[in-house]
Amino acid sequence: MTAKLTAVRSGALTTVQDAGRPGHAHLGVPRSGALDAPAMRLANRLLGNDPDSAVLETTLTGCALRPDRGVTVAVGGAPCPVTVDGRPAAWGAPVRVPAGSVLDVGAAVTGVRSYVAVAGGITAEPVLGSRSTDLLSGLGPLPLRDGDRVPVGTPARPVPPSGVAPWPGPPGELVLPVRLGPRADWFTPAALRTLISAVYRVSPHSNRIGLRTEGPPLERASTGELPSEGMVLGAVQVPPDGRPVVFLHDHPTTGGYPVVAVVAEPALAAAAQAGAGTPVRFTAG
């Protein structure tokens, strides 16, 4: 019989995430998946899991879990305190949690999202080939609630010997390389200069759908309205207030506000860990 984890404390927002479900935008289904995919994959590798095995993604406040059988876990991503039955345990390395003990993943010290990987992976029912929770479409498991029980698979191989993992720290400044387009011509030349020269800050209203920014608005050259058109991961959409929004993994697949630029996908993992108030610079890349 495989283990189950009971949520003793579900936290502000804890979801099941894996590599997501790309390839379904034509059905109106976002990609979803772990916002900080490198952190998810590293936590899985520490346990001998497939790198894209499903994990729990926490947001700011962590979570607490009680397994009904002994499990080995690794907590990575945003640095945070980790305890087992109140005793300090390792962050960023495999930890054994006996049956009935409480693993507490504390609030992020820096960054936003921590990742709880379990040897054997989270085995929630897949939808369209992924176990990811999608907050926009509602596909996948619901966000974790107190008392929920999360199934865990049987480890396919022994947990590797513990080692030092190269965990990147959350960004003190978020630098996002962009390519202008496809609607850059809807903005004035001054607005395009502002985009790649001004310092913005991460808005507290950011979420898995988009990283919202605070800073100088971008002036439109065209005041018309666009018909809805396809949106891609990393699109920098500009709503009527003129402040850029960077679309993340739960973004809508269509939208009617102009996209001034697109962020290179490798830079988006850092965006997942940029807390409110973090400086943001868009650079020509």
Image (cartoon, helix red, strand yellow):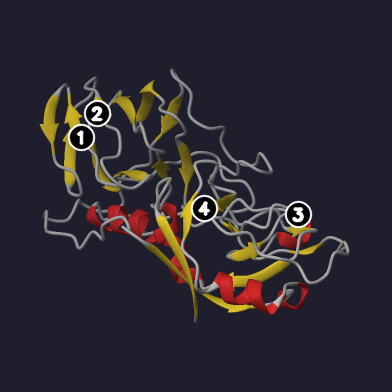
The residues tagged by marks 3 and 2 sit, at their Cα atoms, a distance apart of: 37 Å
Q: CA distance from mark 1 to mark 4?
A: 24 Å
| Few, some or many residues within 10 Å of mark 1 (<14, 14–19, 20+) | many
Asked if the residues shown at circle 4 and circle 3 are in contact, with their CB atoms under 8 angstroms apart, the answer is no
- The answer to which of marks 1 and 3 sits earlier in the sequence is 3
Distance CA(mark 4)–CA(mark 2) = 24 Å
The residue that disc 4 covers is 33
Q: Earlier in the sequence, mark 4 or mark 3?
A: 3
User: What residue is rendered at 30% in x and 33% in y?
Assistant: 107
Q: Dot 3, how many residues are within 10 Å of its Cα: few (below 14), some (14-19), or many (20+)? A: few
The quarter of the rendered structure image containing the N terminus is: top left
**Residue 222: x, y in percent?**
83, 70
Residue at (68%, 60%) from the top-left corner? 238
Answer above or below: position of 157 versus 282. Answer: above
Circle 3: residue type: Gly
Q: Mark 1 and mark 2 in contact? Answer it, CB < 8 Å.
A: yes
Q: Amino acid at mark 4?
A: Gly
Q: Earlier in the sequence, mark 4 or mark 2?
A: 4
**Callout 4: 10 Å neighbours few (<14), some, many (20+)?**
many
**Left or right: residue 200 compared with residue 80:** right
Residue occupied by mark 3: 28
Residue located beneath label 2 in the image = 103
Q: Residue at x 71, y 55 (%)?
A: 239
The residue at which mark 1 appears reads as 82
